[in-house]
Image (cartoon, grey):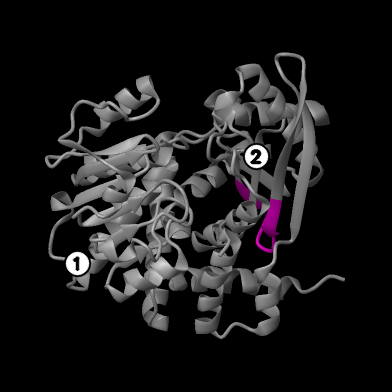
Amino acid sequence: MSLFENALKQFNKAADIMKLDANMREVLSQPKRELTVNFPVKMDDGSIKVFTGHRVQHNVARGPAKGGVRYHQDVTLDEVKALAFWMTWKGAVVGIPYGGGKGGVKVDPSLLSEGELERLSRRYFSEIQVIIGEKTDIPAPDMNTSGKIMGWFMDTYSMNVGEPVLGIVTGKPLELGGSLGRTEATGRGVRVCTEEVVKYLTDKGTVSKPMNQMRIAVQGFGNVGQYTAKLISEELGAKIVAISDISGGFYKDSGFDVNDLMAYCAKNKVIKGYPNADREISNNELLCCDVDILIPAALENQITAANANDIRAKIIVEAANGPITPEGDEILLKKGAFIVPDFLANAGGVTVSYFEWVQGMQWYFWDIDEVRKALHRLMKKAFADVAGAKEKYNTDMRSAAYAVSIEKVATATKLRGIYP
């Protein structure tokens, strides 16, 4: 199945549980708008290369479309559609007034010079400008994009319209209207959900081990994986015993010094060669480690029907988008695993993006304590809402999260009606 078909399968499962009206199901199943652009970029050697990019807006019933832009050699329209689809539910589950959007360019950015990367970024943003705006669609960083690239996006749009527009993108550098706490935001949201799921299961009597005795494996050591591991170890006291990235992984029974590993990764780009570990492991071995909590924070489709039976963790917190296929999901649920779904667990990023957008629109900026306090409050409420829906519908957390989100989007759609 394609990624979008996977997303629809999850959606339809929840829609069945809710007995969602057939007409509403039809409306919410399809993206509102899909834009594909093929654009030329002048390379350093003087040649011209044409790149393909996409921007998809899934739903804007509750507010402007919101979602990142990724640069990757395997980007497809199907992938971008699925990610925009999930962004709709992500914004709704935490209660922020956004719809879902996503963008991507099919490119391996590691093969580009700084100048080529800037020219590609500015041309792509100019091409998609026909459907974006600070009140219509607000992009943000995603895989292989950064605050620097968001700065280029913001400057490109501002130069095109003739005035500075702080709210056109989020995830910008602080000096260009970014928000304090944005870099750590997705990881902090995962940290909040990890704490909340342990509390919830402790209250239910299915977990007896305190958080500071938990052993955790984190797959993926990019921005999300790094801050997830750092905040869980420092603030919650759990041991991060297994970590991996694209170059491989490591296991350390006594737990990693995450700050030391982050410093090594900053210097060497990947964790390969890290000396302070017990042994090397593969990414698949990490997924099957004997740990209390598994946090997939890498790419989609990492846990499938092929390896789900080998997963030993009883709690899985999805920091990545779509790391478990529907078939893998079914196997894990039958085994009794408790899964905190992606668009709840990793919603910290879009939540602080919303805070940044609000600050930019007002030209008034918050301090770090305000950002963190507001993020924790919204994430805790979102987890409680989903847990409540889980019990109401007697279902799993993913279907419950969809139910919470679908109800909000469906209500907004009904109230607005069909125009004309």
Please tell me which residue lies in front, 170 or 17.
Answer: 17
Taking the spot 65% from the left edge, 77% from the top edge, the residue there is 25
Dots 2, 1 in contact, CB < 8 A: no
Q: Is residue 253 left or right of residue 4?
A: left
Q: Quadrant of residue 121?
A: top right
Taking the spot 76% from the left edge, 26% from the top edge, the residue there is 41
Please tell me which residue lies in front, 28 or 286.
Answer: 286
Identify which amino acid the numbered label 1 is placed on: Thr
Does residue 220 belong to the magenta stretch? no
Span colored in magenta: 56-67
Residue denoted by label 2: 106
The residue most toward the right is 420
Q: Is residue 22 left or right of residue 143?
A: right
Please tell me which residue lies in front, 292 or 412.
Answer: 292
Identify which amino acid the numbered label 2 is placed on: Lys
Work out whether 69 lies above or below 28: above
Taking the spot 46% from the left edge, 73% from the top edge, the residue there is 399
The residue most toward the top is 45
Can residue 230 be seen by looking at this rendering?
A: no
Label at residue 54: none
Structural crowding at the residue carrying mark 1, measured as other residues with C-alpha within 10 Å and reported as few (<14), some (14–19) or many (≥20): some
Work out whether 89 lies above or below 110: below
Image depth: mark 2 or mark 1 in front:
2
Residue denoted by label 1: 202
Q: Could you say whether the residue bearing mark 2 is in a helix, strand or loop?
A: strand
